[in-house]
Amino acid sequence: MLYSKLAQAYSRLEATTKRLEMLEIAAELLRETPPEEMERVIYLTQGKIHPNWMGLPELGMAEKMAIEAVARATNVGKEEVQGLLKQLGDLGLVAERLIQEGRVKKLSQKPLTVREVYETLDRIARESGKGSSERKIMGLVSLLVNASPLEARYLVRTVEGRLRLGLGDMTILDALAEAFTGSRENRGVLERAYNLTSDLGYVARVLAEEGLEAVKRVKIVVGKPVRMMLAQRLSTAKEIVEKLNGRCSAEYKLDGERFQIHKKGSEVQIYSRRLENITYMYPDVREMALTHIKAEEAIVEGEGVAVDPETNELRPFQLLMQRRRKYRIEEMVKKIPVTVFLFDCLYADGEDLTLEPYPVRRKKLHEIIEVGPRFQITKSLVSSDPREIERFFDEAISEGCEGLVVKSTAEDSIYRAGARSWLWVKLKRSYQSKMVEPVDLVVVGAFYGRGKRAGTYGALLAAAYDHENDTFKTVCKVGSGFTDEDLAKMPSMFEEYRLPHKPPRVEALIDPDVWFNPAIVIEVIGDEITLSPVHTCAFNLLREGSGLAIRFPRFTGRWRSDKSPEDATTVKEIVDMYKAQLRTI
Ligand code: AMP
């Protein structure tokens, strides 16, 4: 397969502002992809070379090196490349222009193949040690001298780790269903296989090679992260007990980072909620997993929480975020130790437990875990009495938890990978306003600041996630709650996500000064949720011509870098919160 096919599709994807069109273009590309190229095409289109969770070296060549490569390939001075970069704002466009102008002395006219591009990019990513910069530069040069102008645009962006075509996982699944089964209705089957393996390339190859029936047979594998089950929310214990038909187990909701721990003999991998491989950040957790998980092979889940090294008391989430780093890890292990509170077991010694009811999984967890001071199992209370659950809630809060997660214990209480399901319902701490809980929103645009905020952004346009059609719908403009430090770092922090037009997956009636690809998630609390004609969240659902908005929104100070845009609060949750609010007035 020729790389030019990809470049042409990317250029069309980049030009579209409509999600349906985006889907059509992606489906067409996948239909034309031979099965043996499928994984490479999927990863390249996502701007990477492997699923992130593999923890392999990723693309992200420094701009200085990429400039050097473009200069060498086109026989142009570095200064000229830098000058063009200032003018065009994107090194991909610079390379495209220079090649268009015929600056490359073609060694051969060999067209680039997908395999060659993929293998060279993989080699570039893996190069390390002495002389690696030179080898990386020459790797890119070797591609650019054979590239067409359009190919050069995307090669440079890819190698810099900045392809960003804005295709979400769900859109790719839709496109695959469309391309290979003729109907998006089959997305569910593909989504299930993806939820169990977190590997779009793998699911796509199975589909292209063996068909839909084979995709139905895909199973969980120790070492491949399972997309995590998420919780719904309600505001009172009474509502939760009713929703779960009185068959529930309430558990402490710890305020930390979710860990999915995979153990296979002496090998341990730890995955974050966004399925990044974070094993290297938590060598202490890795050690504990080896000594405290008695099963040879297991997949367990829990929450890692920062604790005080002296008192072992729970510490706030922000402190734990300091453990998210690449360097000086051992120092942080001592400074901010972590206690893991486990709450689920997905797999143990050959047994896939994801289709077992929660009490069975919990029992298995007790069987395979040897509890220690820093490796525990969450405290739980099996009860159908709302008052008893409320007391347990107060106790959880007083011990430094965020609230409770109440889980169904019914026969059908399976582990629903990747789903925000009513089998788990969270009850969070109240903030003494009508809007009882904060929400996690995706930043999709911004408005320039004035006066004291000149030079930075005055407010951010924030959106909720609509799982139904994989889009983001605006719900408020947040301008307060930011510290001077937050304001100062915002322009550079958002720079790489800037787009010259509205991102295709964003639905908005407001036109901000700048648009951003949905990437950064912030926590926001407001006074209440109101009907609003200017926001698109739940538009026309509750009232013709109105959506829902958050009134008096404030940033709580929490940049939720642990959440991906698709993990943000959903439109449906906001609708539920609005309805719950009406009941309490
Ligand atoms: P939220 O991030 O507000 O949607 O809440 C769901 C998150 O709470 C999960 O993804 C876990 O990281 C966390 N959590 C803390 N304690 C528990 C628990 N006992 N059971 C399930 N999730 C928990």
Image: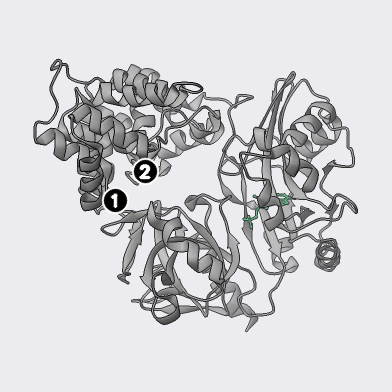
Q: In the shown orientation, is residue 403 left or right of residue 567?
A: right
Whether the residue under disc 1 has CB within 8 Å of ligand 1: no
Tag 1: residue type?
A: Arg
Q: Is residue 160 something that shows in the picture?
A: yes
Q: In the shown orientation, is residue 533 left or right of residue 522?
A: left
Q: Tell me how the rendering is colored.
A: one colour
Q: Dot 2 surroundings within 10 Å: few (below 14), some, or many (20 or more)?
A: many
Above or below 321: residue 108: above
Residue drawn at 32 percent across, 44 percent down = 165
Using the rendered view, name the quadrant where residue 541 is placed: bottom left
Q: For the view shown, which residue lies furthest in the left direction? A: 101
Q: Are marks 1 and 2 in contact (CB under 8 Å)?
A: yes
The disc placed on residue 516 is: none
Q: For the view shown, which residue lies furthest in the bottom direction? A: 585
Residue drawn at 71 percent across, 63 percent down = 427
| Secondary element at tag 1 | helix
In the rendered structure, which disc, 1 or 2, sits on the residue that comes first in sequence? 1
For label 1, the residue is 19
Identify which residue, 235 or 121, lies in the foreground.
Answer: 121
For label 2, the residue is 171
Q: Is residue 208 something that shows in the picture?
A: no
Tag 2: residue type?
A: Thr
Q: Tell me where residue 198 appears, x and y as whole percent.
A: 52, 33
Q: In the shown orientation, is residue 325 left or right of residue 494?
A: right
Residue drawn at 64 percent across, 24 percent down = 222
Identify which residue, 225 or 291, lies in the foreground.
Answer: 291
Q: CA distance from mark 1 to mark 2?
A: 8 Å
Identify which residue, 447 or 176, lies in the foreground.
Answer: 447
Residue drawn at 84 percent across, 57 percent down = 383
**Quarter of the figure with the C terminus:** bottom right
- The image shows a total of numbered marks equal to 2
Q: Tell me where residue 302 appears, x and y as whole percent.
A: 73, 43
